[in-house]
Image (tube, coloured by chain):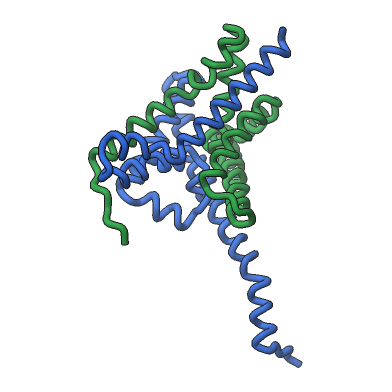
Amino acid sequence: MQQVMTRDEYRKYVDKVSPNSRTLRNTLRAFMVGGVICVIGQFFLNSFKNMGLNQETAGSVTSIVMILLGVTLTALNLYDDLGRFAGAGSIVPITGFANSIASPAIEYKSEGYVLGIGARMFLVAGPVLVYGISVSIIVGIIRFLLKS
Amino acid sequence: MRETIIQYINAFVAGGLICAVGQVLIDKTKLTPARILVLFVSLGVVLTGLGVYEKIVEVGGAGATIPLTGFGYNLAKGAFRDVDKYGLLGAFTGGIRATAAGIAAAVFFSFLAALAVKPRAKT
């Protein structure tokens, strides 16, 4: 015998189930896209190492190339589309950091070259640098104190 | 060849997992993307300070260094290296020294992009 739900029960059921399935879908997408971006990074890293660069230099050049990629896709208006699909998969990689700088720089161009482009590009990157740098200084000081 | 394939798979899984964690935080908490990024970079610094992130990088390769936690990893690694070399001053010079290429590139390329691209009309 088939189970019958009233409309009310059905609505409750949908409310209960759909946020989770949406999260699952979003998480899978973030996993896939984030993974692919990192594979691209690994490809560049390996290529630069094969060219004879040491680990650290190869890492820096890889960062520059990935950032160039992120800025270019932002300028071509493609990174937004990727972001709508991938969510954190496009936000968390370094290409997303590049996007967080390029996107407001372009968007606020009309407010001028100094307070538009110059100031607004740090809308998200600013906080990232403030906290990243500050915490790294604290960690460095702790290291110094533990050593001496 | 086999090793390279494993390396790529590890990068995919590690990078994918880190991004998946970010997505769960966005969906399940009230954290905005900007807060996620701040959290991830800080977490990367702290985990590196505790010696944990180095192990993730050993396995995940670019899968651990490309996400923003990897930016924190480079900040902390640089701070450590400079502290070992120059003492207390190193805590101030190391982080930015190690991440200079990325920061400079992001600022410069974004500036060029803003000069070149017309802002699009909001739809």
Q: Is residue B120 above or below residue B106?
A: below
Q: Is residue B28 above or below residue A8?
A: above
* Chain A tint in image: blue
Image point (65%, 64%), residue name:
A20
Image point (56%, 19%), residue name:
B78
Residue B37 image-quadrant placement:
top right
Residue A12, percent from left and from top: 67, 78
In the rendered structure, the answer to whether residue A18 lies left or right of residue B116 reads: right
Along the line of sight, the residue nearer the viewer: A49 or A120: A120
* Chain B tint in image: green
In which quadrant is the C terminus of chain A drawn?
top right
Residue B2, percent from left and from top: 58, 36
In which quadrant is the N terminus of chain A drawn?
bottom right
In the rendered structure, the answer to whether residue A92 lies left or right of residue A147 reads: left
Residue B104, percent from left and from top: 39, 26
Q: Is residue A122 above or below residue A35?
A: above
Q: Is residue B53 above or below residue A102?
A: above
Residue B39 visible within the image: yes
User: Which residue is most to the bottom?
Assistant: A1
Residue B2 visible within the image: no
Image point (35%, 46%), residue name:
A74
